[in-house]
Image (cartoon, helix red, strand yellow):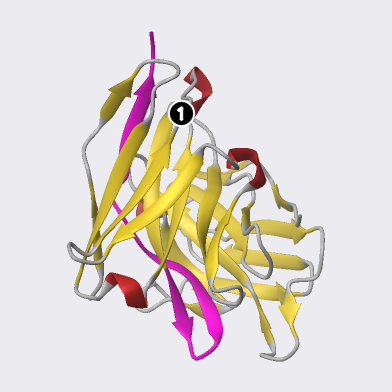
Amino acid sequence: QVQLVQSGAEVKKPGASVKVSCKVSGYTLTELSIHWVRQAPGKGLEWMGGLDPDEGKIVYAQRFQGRFIMTEDSSTNTAYMELSSLRSEDTAVYFCAREDFSGDNPVALDVWGQGTTVTVSS
Amino acid sequence: DIVMTQSPDSLAVSLGERATIYCKSSQNVFYSSGNKNYLAWYQQKSGQPPKLLIYWASTRESGVADRFSGSGSGTDFTLTISSLQAEDVAVYYCQQYYSSPPAFGGGTKVEIK
């Protein structure tokens, strides 16, 4: 049973960077496709990036290109997301999620972390 | 990019009555090689992460109550709650994962009338 446990809430000033962790248990991280989704207060879900198995690489949403990076540490089975040049509009809950597969068919995001609140305020 | 449009934005349904949510994609999300629509439905209760309810447009995730059902193909999809229960109060999202970037609909808030 895969479980994703995220790091705690963060408060950052505009222009700073934030790094959020997503620790995987019950599975080996390198065998998983991890995605990041965020949700601004009172708003809907916004996909930020994730592993595209067809391309064999991480794909980022265009609007975050250049300031959003996803990394992994296989030694600790932990995925990370880092968002830089923070602005107030980046205030949101950030979720990691596992994309499941059945053979070659993606199943969707079936396991989610609990979410990490990032507040950007001067 | 594929754009997902949900309707209505919100609906209020009496306990035990049917709730129907619509989702339209701007492009076809049917993957012919796999004979599957790459369309999922999620439920999000207040203060919680989303929960996968339906994938491949109509396959219920393990453990999901059978009052939840999904239908549709190509560009038009429906999530139906056959008999609304109090615990179904939530926001529901559709998502296409046919092509990158995977996109969510704007969400539909379901309340008790």
Label 1 sits on what residue type?
A: Pro
Furthest residue toward top: A122
Q: Quadrant of residue A9?
A: top left
* Front position in the image: B53 or B82: B53
Range shown magenta: A99-122
Residue drawn at 46 percent across, 28 percent down: A41
Q: Is disc 1 surrounded by few (<14), some (14 to 19) or many (20+) residues within 10 Å?
A: few
Q: Which residue is mark 1?
A: A41
Q: Main secondary structure of the magenta part?
A: strand
On screen, A30 above or below A11? below
* Front position in the image: B11 or A62: A62
**Horizontal arrangement in the rendering, residue A110 relative to residue A26 (left or right):** right
Residue B47: image x %, image y %? 33, 40
On screen, A41 above or below B101? above
Residue A32: image x %, image y %? 37, 73
Residue drawn at 33 percent across, 21 percent down: A12
- From where the camera sits, is residue B112 visible? no
